[in-house]
Image (cartoon, rainbow, N blue to C red):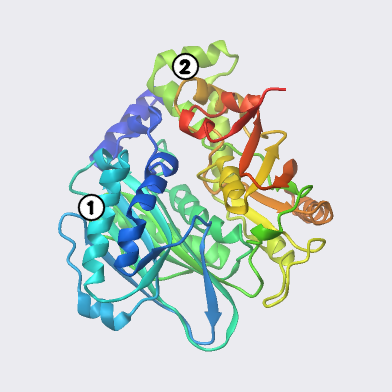
């Protein structure tokens, strides 16, 4: 079977599973857009949710709350949007103080902040009938092409009691597949999905007592068992405890996890201590998704292939880049987490500029937009001097062809650190000893007005006007 025949066979198989790789080829993201939908929706519904006893945490890589003597209790509940049946007695007995959320909405609701916000509010109204108050520490939202496949999944958490000794960190990240040219039950799909969920914890220096509560499903028992087997294999290889949650049993393909870990240090969220002259380091070049999108597009459409070949690249070149990117995505960045942890204050100690990392960020989903979010949180002016890309030629191709809104994004991507020059030198030394290739890409200019200044070349890497409009392009 040649490449083209294999592609269309894969498309046919995935369509039988309720997914359409051609939507990805056209550049449609599986995630609901943060800047145009999720943030405006949350801003709109925040007052109503607070009346219902629900607090939504500000944007962070993970939920962070005290680690205490008694263990936390985690229980899962799933509700259909059309008719959310809430067991209020069960919820009242559990009396959760926090929650992680995964929301899957039909594509017609995914582009409208008002519709998206209204759907969320209706679910929370039903939850409020249990007369509880809790904080949604981290949320994740994805898109389904099927109107009857909208749901909200909550990992309800009742925090422990007793003396605090550190922090617990939690996150959810769920995808459908990472590579439509591979079987959904292949090891790469599950390894990338769990690694991606863990990366938000790792970016904050959390790598101890990691456990995953899988979020997965498939149309057949055979595929479900394959995904389960891959997750167990991941657990054995990387010492991440897999909790037995079972599949969602909704019959659609999903692969991801809610992940929780413990940390006996102060996480690098010292935004008030960001000072002019602090440097920005990334652990590696980024933009890993571009070769996947480019490869699929060129196999599916001869016009894209001709355009690629005219630029001096072959389909085989892109395939090798795609395989290289997926190999990197499959490996959790646990050693990077250990390095960050080593540059954090002990629990209860104060931040010291000449010893500790001030802030970090996971570039996976947002790409360089993470620095705009950091600028907003810290009320700082940040400048990026360069944008190192793992596959610049394919990022540019995907951007020019409107295959991706943000070519700097990835999955289980690079991690950024912001710290003094002295601490950055120490981080570089540690990272290079582990075989990484870190780079300094920018710095903090001043405190005051939030601003992200980026080089003009960013216009070759980001197609979304809404993202570009939130950045200041340096023309000199």
Label 2: state its secondary structure.
helix
* x then y, percent, for residue 460: 58, 23
Placement of the C terminus among the 4 image quadrants: top right
Closer to us: 333 or 409: 409
Instruction: Name the residue: 40% across, 39% down.
Output: 36
Closer to us: 301 or 35: 35
* x then y, percent, for residue 320: 57, 31
Decide: is 168 above or below 34: below
Decide: is 310 above or below 131: above
Per the image, the residue denoted by label 1 is 251
Instruction: Name the residue: 58% across, 32% down.
Output: 321
What's the distance in space between the residues labelled 2 and 1, CA to CA? 35 Å
In the rendered view, does 52 fall on the left or right side of 234?
left
Placement of the N terminus among the 4 image quadrants: top left
Other-residue count near label 1 (Cα within 10 Å), few / some / many at <14 / 14–19 / ≥20: some
Closer to us: 315 or 114: 114
Q: Could one spot residue 317 in this view of the protein?
A: no
Residue 319 badge: none
Label 1: state its secondary structure.
loop
Quarter of image, res 474: top right
Total numbered labels = 2
* x then y, percent, for residue 411: 51, 45
Closer to us: 220 or 254: 254
Determine the residue located farthest toward the left in the rendered image.
83
Instruction: Name the residue: 54% across, 46% down.
Output: 364
Per the image, the residue denoted by label 2 is 305
Whichever of callouts 2 and 1 sits on the residue coming sooner in the sequence is 1
Instruction: Name the residue: 68% across, 35% down.
Output: 388
In the rendered view, does 242 fall on the left or right side of 324?
left
């Amino acid at each position: 079977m040649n490449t083209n025949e294999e592609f269309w066979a894969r498309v046919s198989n995935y369509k039988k599973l309720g997914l359409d790789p051609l939507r990805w080829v056209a550049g449609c993201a599986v995630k609901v857009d943060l800047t145009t939908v999720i943030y405006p929706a949350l801003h709109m519904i925040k007052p109503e949710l607070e009346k219902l006893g629900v607090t939504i945490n500000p944007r962070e890589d993970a939920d962070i709350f005290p680690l205490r003597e008694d263990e936390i209790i985690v229980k899962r509940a799933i509700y259909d949007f059309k008719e959310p049946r809430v067991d209020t007695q069960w919820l009242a007995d559990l009396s959760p103080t926090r929650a992680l959320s995964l929301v899957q909405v039909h594509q017609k609701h995914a582009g409208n902040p008002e519709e998206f916000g209204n759907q969320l509010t209706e679910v929370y109204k039903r939850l409020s009938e249990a007369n509880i108050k809790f904080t949604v520490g981290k949320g994740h939202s994805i898109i389904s092409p099927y109107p009857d496949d909208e749901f909200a999944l909550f990992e309800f958490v009742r925090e422990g009691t007793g003396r605090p000794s550190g922090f617990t960190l939690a996150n959810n990240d769920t995808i459908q597949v990472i590579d439509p040219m591979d079987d959904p039950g292949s090891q790469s799909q599950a390894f990338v999905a769990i690694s991606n969920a863990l990366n938000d914890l790792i970016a904050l220096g959390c790598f101890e007592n990691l456990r995953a509560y899988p979020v997965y499903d498939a149309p057949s028992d055979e595929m479900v068992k394959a995904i389960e087997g891959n997750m167990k294999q991941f657990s054995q290889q990387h010492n991440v405890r897999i909790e037995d949650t079972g599949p969602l049993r909704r019959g659609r393909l999903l692969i991801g996890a809610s992940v929780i870990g413990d940390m006996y240090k102060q996480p690098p969220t010292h935004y008030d201590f960001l000072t002019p002259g602090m440097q920005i380091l990334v652990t590696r070049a980024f933009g890993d998704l571009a070769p996947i999108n480019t490869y699929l597009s060129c196999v599916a459409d001869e016009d894209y292939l001709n355009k690629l070949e005219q630029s001096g690249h072959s389909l085989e070149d892109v395939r090798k880049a795609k395989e290289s990117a997926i190999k990197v995505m499959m490996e959790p960045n646990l050693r990077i987490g250990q390095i960050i942890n080593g540059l954090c204050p002990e629990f209860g100690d104060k931040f010291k500029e000449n010893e500790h990392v001030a802030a970090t960020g996971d570039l996976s989903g947002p790409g360089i937009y993470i620095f705009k979010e950091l600028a907003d949180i810290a009320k700082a002016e940040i400048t990026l001097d360069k944008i190192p890309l793992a596959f610049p030629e394919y990022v540019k191709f995907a951007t020019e062809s409107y295959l991706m809104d943000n070519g700097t994004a990835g999955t289980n991507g690079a991690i950024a650190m912001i710290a003094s020059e002295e601490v950055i030198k120490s981080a570089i030394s540690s990272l290079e000893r582990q075989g990484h290739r870190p780079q300094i890409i920018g710095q903090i200019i001043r405190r005051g007005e939030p601003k992200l200044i980026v080089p003009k070349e960013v216009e070759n890497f980001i197609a979304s006007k809404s993202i570009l409009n939130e950045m200041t392009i340096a023309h000199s």
